[in-house]
Image (cartoon, grey):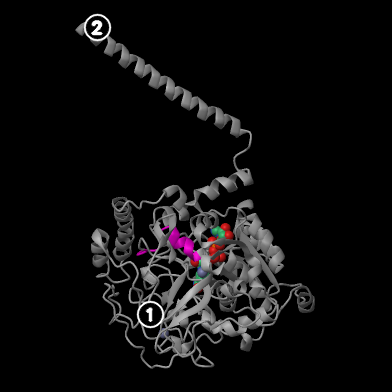
Amino acid sequence: MTNPDFDSIALARRIPGWGADLRPENRPGVPKEKVPDNGTGAHWEQPEQQITSVRIFKTIERPEVTPVFGTTCAPKGLSGVMRTAAYRLGEGKISRWVTLLLADRVDMFESILLDVIKGRAGNPFSEMGLGTEFRNRREKGFMPRGWYPVIAVGIVGLFAASRAVHQQKEKKRFATFSDEFKKVA
Amino acid sequence: MLAMTYRGPYRVRLDEKPIPQIEHPNDAIIRVTRTCLCGSDLHIYHGLLPDTRIGSTFGHEFVGVVEEVGPTVQSLKPGDRVGVPFNISCGSCFFCKKSLYGNCENTNPNSSIGAGFFGYSHTTGGYDGGQAEYVRVPFADVGPFKIPDGMSEDDAVLLTDVFPTGYQAAEMGDIKAGDTVIVFGAGPVGIFAAKSAWLMGAGRVIVVDQADYRLEFVQNYAQVETVNFAQVDDIIMTLKKMTDWRGADVCIDAVGAEADGDWLQTLAGVRMKLSGGATTALGWAIESCRKAGNVSIVGVYGPPINLVPMGTAMNKGLTMRMNQCNVKRYLPRLIEHVMSGRVKPSDIITHRVPLEEVSDAYHRFSSKLDHCIKTVLIPPKAA
Ligand SMILES: NC(=O)c1ccc[n+]([C@@H]2O[C@H](COP(=O)([O-])OP(=O)(O)OC[C@H]3O[C@@H](n4cnc5c(N)ncnc54)[C@H](O)[C@@H]3O)[C@@H](O)[C@H]2O)c1
Ligand SMILES: [Zn+2]
Ligand SMILES: [Zn+2]
């Protein structure tokens, strides 16, 4: 205890529940290792084994696949090959984790490709939740209101400039076209 | 059914997925009625945890109604209102028999670092999570707890992770009457660690963060002192001065891998991924703890290496404790705290939104917009 002005009565008055779990007996995690008071709910010694047709990776630091596991998102494609390689390495090896992380990025590109082929590609703007960004930043006033007219003028200006360039190009094209035409005529 | 799916770093969306099936005789299928976003979800949302596969559904904090049970399930029946601890535990292994449910060795084939968790990558077992209309819950006789009459689902959903985790953080600090406790991080976990430090008889509780709105919230919610580390020159000096130059008796890391405050750590650990995240807050906890004090870690870091000032910890004779939360063992006592009104977990909820708005919800929470502390997603069938 390093706090010189500690006054338990004042604290108990000020803070609801102060000291309710001061006694170790009231702390459910003390001692750290403890046989559960009322059992765990398990009515088996060794749980039954889950069976699946999905490909499950097993760390080499375990003897068998665990009795229960998740079956979402089976490994596939190049990322699946990379994951297979990674799971041959022990968990103390940095290369195991780095390979898995790289496989995650490859998986992302593979999924984008697959989405595009299936015609299901999502809108990255909405997937990133950027709508909330603009709503909130505006409310927060991160971008000073004074900038709005400048931005508006900027956008209109850009539009006008691009139109001007476009018209210039058209004119040129038309000019060369009419020159050619004249020549032919 | 509708389910959130991961598309790559910073990208999630709502997709149509098949309703999960019973895959093991002790499984249950739960219809989700409330599910939260958690600071832990941010690590996988940002793509920091290896083997987070595209298309997987996140969500390890959820409550709901039992829809279907496997043939060996005895303690639940369809229609029961349940909460489900985020760790999946078998109840019968070496670790479960010692009440260390977060360390169960029968639920995660992919890695020996931890038990299986719902919706938290293949490194923790490859289970789809609860940010969906339905979720498969293995070992239904072990994990789920019936929500007591009179307890709201909003309170119950915070018992599936953050309140127990904050409580365990304080408990691992071995707080004695009158101790000075510093909590790093004013997110949901840090808020409950601060609250729990008082329950355990702390004499002073100081919370450190850089988000003023969170510091303001925790001042009111947990009656603590606060320091904004972004507004002081040297956070460790500031904390030492506040604690008679000696340091706190107990320091708690409730921040984890995405800590701010040290650009070098952020560059190496978060941007370049040369280590399992930035250990800035953990470093500060070690530096600002008094000699022979206790450092408790619940902040999550990635495998396999981290930059930690171990020499300082050793020379100071610190005791360091850490773990995933063993949620199940805390439930009876924490339910008492909630029912008696000593702690009202749902007060930290700042956003209740439809599951359909999941992309916006992630971005808001990740970027700390709109004073977000805790977001609850509500699937259409539960609204
Ligand atoms: N061990 C477990 O069982 C368990 C369970 C749940 C969550 N967690 C972990 O706990 C941590 C906190 O979770 P949360 O939901 O409260 O997250 P959160 O992201 O809402 O909160 C983290 C807070 O830390 C602050 N912060 C950043 N850098 C800091 C620094 N250097 N010093 C002090 N504060 C700093 C942020 O501003 C933020 O407010 C996460 O790492 C999460 O993964 C662990
Ligand atoms: Zn969580
Ligand atoms: Zn177990």
Between residues B341 and A122, which one lies in front from this camera angle? Answer: A122
The location of residue B363, given as percent across then percent down, is: 51, 54
Q: Is residue B130 magenta?
A: no
> For mark 2, what is the residue?
A182
Name the kind of residue labelled 2 in the image: Lys
Image point 51% across, 27% down: which residue? Answer: A156
Which image quarter is the C terminus of chain B in?
bottom right
Where on the picture, by quarter, is residue B151? bottom right
Q: Is residue B64 left or right of residue B209?
A: left
| Residue at x-position 53% and y-position 57% | B361
Question: In the displayed structure, would residue B275 be above or below residue B222?
Answer: above
Q: Tell which of A147 and B71 is nearer to you.
A: B71
Q: Dot 2: what SS?
A: helix
Where does the image place residue B354, in percent across and percent down from the top left?
Answer: 54, 61
Q: Quadrant of residue A31?
A: bottom right
Question: Residue B47: within the magenta?
Answer: yes
- Magenta segment: B40-52
Count of numbered labels shown in the rendering: 2
Foreground mark, 1 or 2, reads 2
Which residue is tagged 1?
Answer: B22
